[in-house]
Amino acid sequence: MKIGKAIITAAGPGQRRLPLQTLIDRDGEQKSVLTVIIEEVSRAGINDTCIVIHPDDEIAFRSFAGDHSGHISFVYQQEPRGYGHAIWCARDFVKGEPFLHLVGDHLYVSRMLKGCAQRVVESAETESCSVSAVQATREGYLPNFGVVSGKRIHGRNDLYAIETVIEKPTPTEAEQRLIVPGLHAGYYLCFFGIHVLTPAVMQILQRQIEGAPDGRLATISSALHQLAHQEKYLALEMQDYRYNVGVKYGLLNAQLALALSGEDRDEVITMLMEMLLIREHYAGERSKE
Amino acid sequence: MSVLTAIITSKDQSTRDQALDAFCRSATLEQLLSECKSLEEFRHASLNLYEQVRALFFLYAIHRFHLPTKKGLPSRGLIPFQGYDDLLHRRFEEAIERFLAAQSQDGPHDGISSALAAAYRSLGFQTLANQVRASVRSVRGNQWMFRAGHPSDYPLRVVPTLLEKTDGLYPLLHERTPVRMDLSHSGWSDIFFLGMDFPEGARVLNISINLAVRDHHAQQIPRPPVEAYFRVIDTPMIRLVSTDLGAVTEITSFAQIFDYAVDYLGLLKGAVIASGIVPPSMEGATQPLADLLSELVGPGLGIEIVSQVNNIPKGSRLAVSTTLLGSIIAVCMRATGQTSSLSGSLTENERRTIASRAILGEWLSGSGGGWQDSGGVWPGIKIIQGVCSTDGDIEYGVSRGCLLPRHTILTHEDVSPASRKQLQDSLILVHGGMAQDVGPILEMVTERYLLRSETEWQGRQEALALFDHIVAELKRGDIQAIGKSTHRNFLGPIQTIIPWASNLYTESIIHRVKAEFGKDFWGFWMLGGMSGGGMGFLFHPSRKIEAQNRLWEIMRSEKHRLEHGIPFAMEPVVYDFTVNEQGSSAELSRGEKTVMPQPYYALIIPSLLRRDPRAMSVHQRNELDHFSSACRSNPALEGMLQQIFERILPDGGTEIPQHQSLNELLDRYGFDRIQHNQLKADLKSGRIGLAQNRLPINSTIVDVEDGDVDEIAGDRFSKYASVGSAAIASGTVAVLTLAAGSGSRWTKGAGTVKALNPYCRIGGVHRTFIETHLAKTRRTMKQFGATIPHVFSTGYLTHDAIKQHLEDAQNYGFDGDLLLSPGSSIGLRLIPTVRDLRFAWLEMPQQLLDEQAQKVLESLHASLMDWAERTGEGSDYTDNLPLQCLHPVGHWYEIPNLFRNGVLLQLLRSFPDLQHILVHNIDTVGANLDPAILGHHIESKAGMTVEVITRRLDDRGGGLARTEGRLRLIEGLALPREEYEFILSYYNTATYWIDLDRVLHVFGLRRSDLASPKTVTEAVRSLASRMPTYITLKNVKKRWGKGQEDIYPTLQYEKLWGDMTALPGLRCSYVVVPRERGQQLKEPAQMDGWLRDGSADYVQSLCEWQ
């Protein structure tokens, strides 16, 4: 199985401006979040990317895609009908081929030489099936993620055959249905935001959307749950870092993470130290007064 | 290998089910002691819960019931105080270690065996309770609640639908849950421990029902009696409202929600915690609760939970409290997405989670329930049965059964709609109104089950067979046969297992119903732990309406007849019911349809109206607007405006009649206001109080010396017996039974007359204390051919009731002289000082409860101290029924009252040779006119002979001591240190033989003075002033609502007759009597042991019944 296409979703309400935020990447250059994500896709050897956006956003996205805008297509999600629907909007783009999918509001910092998306793509190509990146996550974060459970693949520490996928489960349900042997108590395999999916997902989404009354939101998790019962579907456990730029201080956090793992590491550390020392100094002065 | 460990560990079921009693009956003392040693080693070595617990109960039973009966076991010996202290602090293993060390040092004796029995039993129950808790915590779906410690870890969110306002109002989620009835009566097999040990035997037929209290004026349609509501509010708090208890609380901190007893909302708090909304692991978190609410509902928002139990009184035996927990947990789980749907029914998995969390909630809020009690969450009729644990279950390898049972719902093919209807048309559910504490019964069942006591074990097998019958009868729709089976179950297995399940009240009702309805009465059916509260009667359908009316009347008249002796919490009620085929279900309403139950508005709206409109939140203003328009248009809120108007305007004057009647009573019973005011002043200034009861700390208190007490045995026995017999035969003896007190420990302060309580079935009939005493005197009279006068001293609380009762019972056919000696002293209870409460609860050694129960108790103590402070420390206690505000002033007065009220004079006219009076408490049922003891008393020429017994662990309250060199009885209240009691070998039975002339002499009186009231009164007052006054703390019940009871501590004072032994002018002698003679029955929980250890048979042998 060869993966040559990628879908990035960026049409969700509240998410539309996030990929357009700028920050300094590891190489010291100023880029938009969108550019950093597109580069993550390129590192995985994929140059044919589609971004699902709101119809009003195309001009802005094109300008923020920088040098990459030449090989990017845009697909519109006319109404906010959910994450699953957004992916389904790109069905004509994938044309029945497997594809890489990333969300538009997450940045990834790999702990290895290879990029995060790259390793997911390699696993999918080797195993010839859909693969979702997952990460062991504390139960306090369950309200934010889709969660999977499954059995570890013999001989592999980081690969699981997925059996169940539930979107934002309660801890009660997670404990009853999503416990994975080998994880610490209270930890679950939550989606990392990177997936390689086979075209079967588009068919499942199609059925879901056609079967749903107007306005009902299609969730990707329920489609993926069905996928797990339909064909081989694996989870690749990542030890890397992901940053959601859509939460409070998310962008700052992502920026610091990028800076601390890049060329300007020493400069940033010095800056932070200075900031802390000055703060301490003034705090001491104030307490003397 | 020891015989008993072999029984426990046997692979063969029939060997394992062997009874302990069978072996112990024939074993010698040495054999039993050696078995105890082996069992002790075995229980430490075994890793299996069941083996450990069974060994513990074997050890308990050997020490409690078998060793004391073996020849060669000395009865006198001391119990180490440190061990007792360990027991109080629930350090059971340490206590056992200390008691065993004492046993090997001093040799075995009756006292140390009583201590070991208590320690083994407590450890057994603690081990079982810990296992249930561990299982509840380990249930998948519950574990996370014990991990989340910080609001930022908090993983629940309210489902978005509940945050979408319509017309300015948040949506309202409304859960309705039926209660459950157990048609089979499970033979208590739904107790967790039993289900976990013998899952095959744990089976119940559980039916979800709608209910309505039958109203003779208006037809009520049965509906799910338990309801819970959930909605978002725009204030960051958790508002809990119980409409039936009329209580509201607004919680803004973690500490408040974990404070269970501070108000009446402990159960609601337990449910909120068990639902995961505030996980139990957050207890002690110091962050504001708003942090958690901000995660749950959003910044600035909170939640409101409202509960309603529709007129079902407490003690209905329909598992109302567990159902309420289940209902609130269900609505909270729905609201936080822990169920698949917000409205409608629940899935099997969700019901199981709710059931396990209801168990958790029971534990947290300190209530108790069985394993089938969440049955109402399930629909219709179901069989609930224990499940054997298998590999993968958390219980596997620990206990044979799983904590949670399996529910199999019977379909309409299994039990046809016609059969269901027939059941509804035949069965009448009632609440008899009795106040009951089922806790001890459940412990008894567990104990007997683990001991496999022969007859009880057979009873259990029979109950299991009857269960199969009942299920088959229900399936074929033969309701008459069901009636027969449930009736047989009640008369047979249930009472074989626990005789206390029945009582005189229940049996009287059954008797009358049977007589009135003949063959149309199909049978009685007992619900739950014991009868007298919730009960069922099956009739021919054609007579159901008539039977409902008659049952109500019969129950009322029987209650009226017995209520002086039996505590009732409320008037009896009859219910209408229908089978509920939905189980717990919910619906969501929005906008103008969001209507809370009527009583909610009656509680909330008046306080809203008093507020400045500008201080109200938007939601509150919308709520008011909505309410005012709904009142006009919604029929459910008809009459609300009038109700609220009445609430807002204060209603004066209702208290006045009660006060008047209290004052009348005080005047009638000779209340001494001057003395009372002096007492109040002394109490407030700290001159008297609980701490001041004690003798100075430097007092010398030591145990008796050789020769201080006499044991009547051997050659001397026959000599004394012949002297005593002659005295009885010659008419020189009378009996005085002290019956003026209320026996507050017997009913936890319910204020009934203990003398009239049918305390036990002896010789096949429920006997009152008074009847028992008369039967003993009757037998003595017959034996000696003498006439013996029997006097009962009475008080303000007991006189009229005893007099009426004796008239009704025609003196139980007693043909001797039977006299009542009315009291002429009374006290008014006082609100305790915080100082005294602190002393009683914090400084005196207290029984520490199980961790959670202790938290609840401490919270209750804190709120009671607050109550005392707010209401006025040391002021008169008047906020209760008048009779509950008064108190008797101690039994010291009951003997001089004989001199003052003319009864002694009257006696002397009929029996001029009267010389000796046996004085004993109403609850010392083994005391009789024993000729040998009387002979000893006469020969000793003592002014008073006191009967003492060797001490057991439960014998608390002083004893016989050498105090400053003088041999005397010392009250527990007066001991300078708690541990002094444990150096005293003998305990006071409160049975005295008094020599009339010598005692009169101490009062400064002669027989001839008795005709002069003034002389007598002065003499009594003069001696009374020399007697110590003890301040004591007594619990008083206050009843309210529908069978609700609050218990308040109050202060009272008393003078005690035992202090007469300290008077230099009265020479006393002391004799040791056997325990069965000297045992006082202070609490119903003692009764089971008393019945089983041979004491009851002993009493029966002393009696000749009418």
Image (cartoon, coloured by chain):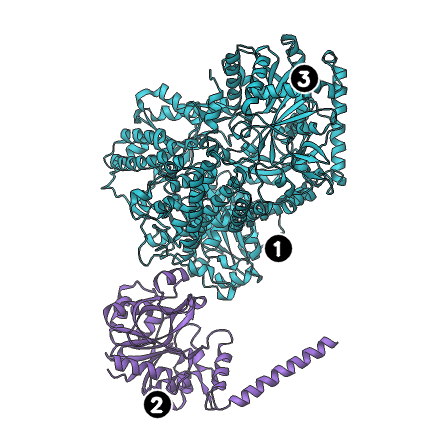
> SS at mark 3?
helix
Q: Colour of chain B?
A: cyan
Mark positioned earlier in the residue sequence (1 or 3): 1
Q: Are marks 2 and 1 on the same chain?
A: no
Q: Would you name the residue on which mark 2 appears? A: A70
Residue B677 position within the rendered picture, expressed as x and y whole percent measured from the top left: 75, 32
Q: Quadrant of residue B574?
A: top left
CA separation in Å, label 1 and label 3: 76 Å
Closest to the observer, A30 or B171: A30
Q: Tell me if residue B792 can be seen.
A: no
Q: Residue B105 at what x, y percent from top left?
A: 55, 46
Nearest the camera: A135 or B651? A135
Task: Indicate the secondary structure of the residue bearing disc 2.
Answer: helix
Q: Residues within 10 Å of mark 2 (few under 14, many from 20)?
A: few
- The answer to whether residue B569 is visible is yes
Output the letter for the chain in purple. Answer: A
Q: Residues within 10 Å of mark 1 (few under 14, many from 20)?
A: few
**Residue B615's mark?**
1
Q: Which residue is mark 3?
A: B996
- Name the chain letter of the residue that bears numbered label 2: A
